[in-house]
Structure formats: structure tokens, C-alpha cells
Amino acid sequence: MTPLWAILVAIAGTFIGSFGALFFKKGADRLKGKNMLRKTINNPPLLTGLFLYGLSTIPFMIALKHGELSIIYPAVSTQYVWVSIISVEFLGEKMGALKWSGVALILLGVVLISLAA
């Protein structure tokens, strides 16, 4: 049996990881021209993204310790939801009705799997 708090901890980890994706995007935009390796190493947004992705694994491991993989892992897909919201808010990306419908289906799937917990 997977406790609800473990699912919520996993979802909190995906929130942290979604900001990692945001920083990866910002860092990737700086990778133009020659000396890609040096630009990658000396790229604070990329390094921040890497740190946030690493940090996001801590709540995930805690959740896995107390819950079932088959319940916890689907909750990781909420990262797509967070990234969609963050990309609109911080990057000015556009989300049409079809994309939001996909986000809603992801949330529905997570809720249905969580109810099985």
C-alpha cells in the first residue's frame, strides 16, 4: 500500500525537476558557435538545471522507500504538467487547447493510478 503522502512527495520532486528543465532550456539557448564544451561547463543555467534535477531525485527516493514503484513512478509524469505551466509563465510559450487537453489527460491518469494506492 502506498500512502498518499509518498505520492505527494514524489509530485513535489517533479516540481523541483521541472525548474531544472527550465534552466536547461535557458542554458541551451546559450550554446551557439564554437567551444561547446567550454560553453557547457561555464554555463550557470545548465549547471543550475543539473543541480535541480539531482535535487529532485531526493524526494523521489524517499517516496519510493515508502511506496510502490507502480504507483509512485506514474506520478513523475506530473513533471509534464509543471513544465507546461512553467514554459508558459517563464518562457512565453503558447499552449493551445490540444496541448492543455493532453495535460488534463496526464493529470487524470495520475489521479486514477493514485486511487489504486
Image (spheres, helix red, strand yellow):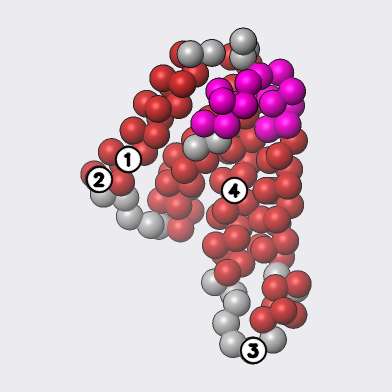
CA gap between label 2 and label 1 equals 6 Å
Q: Are marks 1 and 4 in contact (CB under 8 Å)?
A: no
Residue located 59% across and 87% down the image: 33
Residue 110: quarter of image: top left
Q: Is residue 66 magenta?
A: yes
| Mark 4 or 2, nearer chain start | 4
In the drawing, what numbered circle is on residue 34? Answer: 3
Q: Is residue 64 magenta?
A: yes
Q: Are marks 3 and 2 in contact (CB under 8 Å)?
A: no
Q: SS for tag 3?
A: loop
Q: SS for tag 4?
A: helix
Residue located 40% across and 27% down the image: 109
Q: Residues within 10 Å of mark 4 (few under 14, many from 20)?
A: many
Q: Which residue is mark 2?
A: 98
CA gap between label 3 and label 1 equals 38 Å
CA gap between label 1 and label 4 equals 20 Å
Q: Quadrant of the N terminus?
A: top right
| Mark 3 or 1, nearer chain start | 3
In the drawing, what numbered circle is on residue 102? Answer: 1
Q: Are marks 2 and 1 in contact (CB under 8 Å)?
A: yes
Q: Are marks 4 and 2 in contact (CB under 8 Å)?
A: no
Q: Is residue 48 visible?
A: yes
The magenta stretch is 60-74
Q: SS for tag 2?
A: helix
Q: Is residue 89 visible?
A: no
Q: Which residue is mark 4?
A: 19
Q: In the depicted view, which residue is nearer to us: 90 or 36? A: 36
Q: Amino acid at mark 2?
A: Leu
Q: Position of residue 9 (x, y in %)?
A: 64, 25
Residue 4: quarter of image: top right
Rendered view: 113 above or below 98: above
